[in-house]
Amino acid sequence: MGTAFDLLHPAVQRKLWDMKWTELRPVQKQGIVHLLNAGGDCIVSSPTASGKTEAAFLPILSAIADEPRGSVRAMYVGPLKALINDQFRRIEDLCSRMDLPVHKWHGDVDASARKNLLNSPGGVLLITPESLEAMFVLRPAKMAAVFARLDYVVIDELHAFLASERGAQLRSQLHRLQLRAGCNPTRIGLSATIGEPERALRWLRPNGAPATLISDEASASTIAIRVRAIWRRPPGEGTDREADPSLAELGRSILVACHGKTNLVFANSKSRIEEVADEMATQAEQMCLPDEIVVHHGSLSKERRESAEARLRQDRPCTAVCSNTLEMGIDIGEIDEVIQVAAPWSVASLTQRLGRSGRRANERRTLRGFFVEDAPTEKSDIWDLLHLPFIQGVAVIELMLEGFVEPPDTGRSHLSTLVHQVLSVLAETGGIQASPLYDRLVDAGSFSGVSRADFAVLLRQLGSLELLEQMPDRTLVLGVEGQKIVEHYTFYAAFNAASELRVVCNADLIGTIAIPPPPGEHLILAGRRWRVEEIDPERQEVLVSPARGRRAPWFIPRIGAIHRRVHEKMRALLVETNVPTYIDETARDVLEHARATATKCNAFEPVAQPFEVGVRAFVFGGSRVQQTLSIALAAAGVRYSDEGVGFDVECEPAEFGSILREFAASPNESRLAEFADEKMRLRELGREKFERFLPSELWRIAFVRDELDVAEAARVAALLSG
C-alpha cells in the first residue's frame, strides 16, 4: 500500500489486512500523510463513497492507539443520530484489534452508556451538537476530565453546519471546550459538496490559520441523466374531486423507472412525499408489481425511519420516497438510481442526492427528474406559461454538470444562536461578568461582527426580559425567564423545531403532523392511509385507524433561498436555442412553450414593461435581490405580486420608474429593515429560534446583512427603471 500505509499503527495495518484492503484511496493517502506528518486542521472533500471517514480515522486511530485512555482522545460530531449510529459501528469495527473504546452519546443512548463514558473516558466519542450542549449545561464539572487530552475533532457532513445555527453553535462549543478542558484539538471536516472551499477552510477555526484542503475530484464517476415532464390535467368527468390524472401518471412513471432496482425518490415537501408514495403503492397494486415502497422523512417515528433504512440495505429491490433525511451518509446499502420530483432548491442538494447512487467501483451515478407542469389554457398567465419550476430544475442540473456548487454563507450573524450561547454559558459557569463572556463567545470569532457596544445592548435587552440579571459585583446570572428556558428539554437545540402532534394507532407512534384534519377525515402518513378518530389536545396526539380514504397531510413548509447563479441560468435557458439531450419529448414541449412565452414578453431584458394592470419586471437575481426589491416596493406603498423571479406591480410605469430610481440612487438599508420589522412583521415569522429576544436595532442590522443584497438590488433597480 505504499508510504502512507507504513505510517499507520501496526494494529490499524493488521485490521486493513483482515478487511482485505489491497490499496488506499487517494484522499486516504493524503489524509494519513497530512495528519501523521504535517498535522493541522484540514477538510477532506471528495465525492460520496470515496473513503472520507477512513481518511480521517485511520490516522487518528494510529495516533491515539498507544495511549487511548484517560480522556476522550477523538470526538466525532454528526448532524444526525442515525448517521452517528452508522459511524459508531464502522469505527468500532476499525478498532476491533485495539484496546480502544468507542462511545456514542445522543438522545437515544441509555444512561448506563453515558455513565460509563463519564466514569472511564477514553478512545472515540460520537456525539451531536445538542448532546454536547447538554453536557455543558448539566455536567460542566465533568468536562475537564472527559476531554482533557482531546486531540482530534471530526465534523461529518460539514456542509450541513457551515451556514446554519448548528454550525454557529458548534464553533462556539469547540472554543468553550478548549477553555474548559485545556485542550486544543485538530479540527477535521468531511464533506462531499462544498462550493468555494476557501470559505469553509477559514470557517473551521475562527481567527486561526485556514485549514488545509484534501480533495480528490478525480474519483467522481460518470453521470447518466433523464428528465421527463408530465402535463397536469384536470380530473375527468365522473371522478371524485381528489382524483388527479397527472399524479397517477407520475406514480406509474416513477414505479416503472424504479422496477427491479433499489432507488431513492426525493420530493421537496413531506406532503408531496406521502402523496407520491401512496400513488406509487396504488399503481404497484394495479400493475401487480412486487416492488416494495418505503417512506423516510423527519416527521416519521424513529422506528419507521430505521425500518426503511434496514429495508434499503437488503438485497431485494426497494424504493424509498424520502426527504433530505437520506441526503446524508447514512448506511442504506447500494442505490441504483436517484429520482428527483420537481426542482430542488439548490445545486448542492441535488449533488448530494445524486452522490447516493453509483457507489460501486466504475459504476455510473444515475439521476431521473420528473416534473408535472400545468398545461397551457386560456386562463394561464405569463408566469404560468414560463414554466418556472421546470426551468429551475433544468437550470440546477445544468449547473451541477458545470461543476458549480453554491458557496456556503459563512458570514451570517447568528445573533439568535449568540443569545442561546449566552444562556448556556451562564448555566455552565453559574455566573460570569460581561467582558469575559464577550471574550469567550464573540472575540474568539464564533460570532463575527458584534462589537462590545452591540454586545452590551444585547445583554441589557436580555436583562429587561429577565433572561439574565446582574449581581451587585457585576456578575451576570440566569434570570427567572432564562432559567425556565434553559431547564426546558428543547433548550439544547439552537434551531427552531416545528411543533407537531403525535399520530398514534393503537399506542404505536406513526409520526408527527403540524395540522391534522378533523375527526372522520383521512390522511396519508408513513406511506399508509389513516382515518382520524380523535384529536387529544392535552396529550398532543392524533388517534388514527387504518382506512382506505386518502389525503396528503399538511406540514410546515421549509423554503430554501435560491442562489443568483440559479436564476441567471434560468434566464439563459430561456434565451438559448439548444435543447438538453437528456429531456424527453414532453419536456422539450415545455421548454419550447417557455421560450416562446419569454420571447413574447421580452423576459430577457431587465427593463420594466407595462401590461394590463400595471408594470411587469423580470429580475432573475436570486432570492436575496428578490426579497430586497419586494421590501422596497412594499415600503413605497404599491401593491405587487412576488413571482419568485420578478414582479407584477399595480401602478403606472412613471410611478414605478420613480420608485426604482429613488431606491437605486439612495438605497436606505435602515428604512428597509425597519419596514420589514414593523410593517411586514418578518421577525415574527421566526427565522431563528431566539431572535424574538433581540433588540430591534441589532435584529435590523443582522437582517440586512443576512437576508438582503441591497447593492445588487440597487443595480437591478437602475436597469429596470430604464
Image (tube, rainbow, N blue to C red):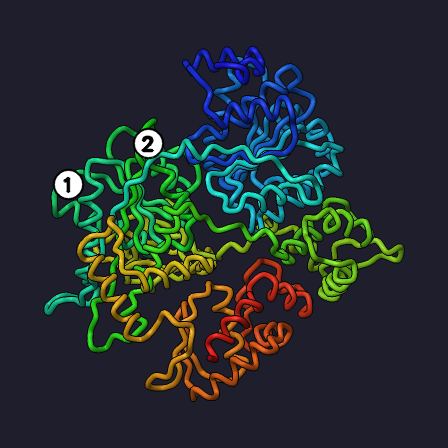
Q: Please, is residue 222 above or below residue 707 in the view?
A: above
Residue matched to label 2: 334
Residue 330 located left or right of residue 205: left
Q: Residue 274 appears at what percent x and percent y?
A: 30, 52
Residue nearest the viewer, comparing 239 with 487: 239
Nearer-N-terminus badge (1/2): 1
Q: Is residue 105 visible?
A: no
Rendered location of residue 244, percent (x, y)? 19, 62
Of the two numbered discs 1 and 2 in the rendering, the one whose residue sits closer to the viewer: 2
What amino acid is found at the position of numbered circle 2 in the picture?
A: Glu
Residue behind mark 1: 289
**Depth check, front residue: 307 or 595:** 595
Q: Is residue 630 above or below residue 474?
A: below
State the mark number for residue 412. none
Quadrant in the picture for residue 198: top right
Looking at the image, which is closer to me, 284 or 64? 64
Q: On the picture, is 120 further left or further right than 91?
A: right
Q: Where 94 falls versus 215 (above or below)?
A: above
Residue 474: x, y in percent? 86, 56
User: Residue at the spot x=50%, y=44% of the render?
Assistant: 194
- Disc 2 is placed on an element classified as loop
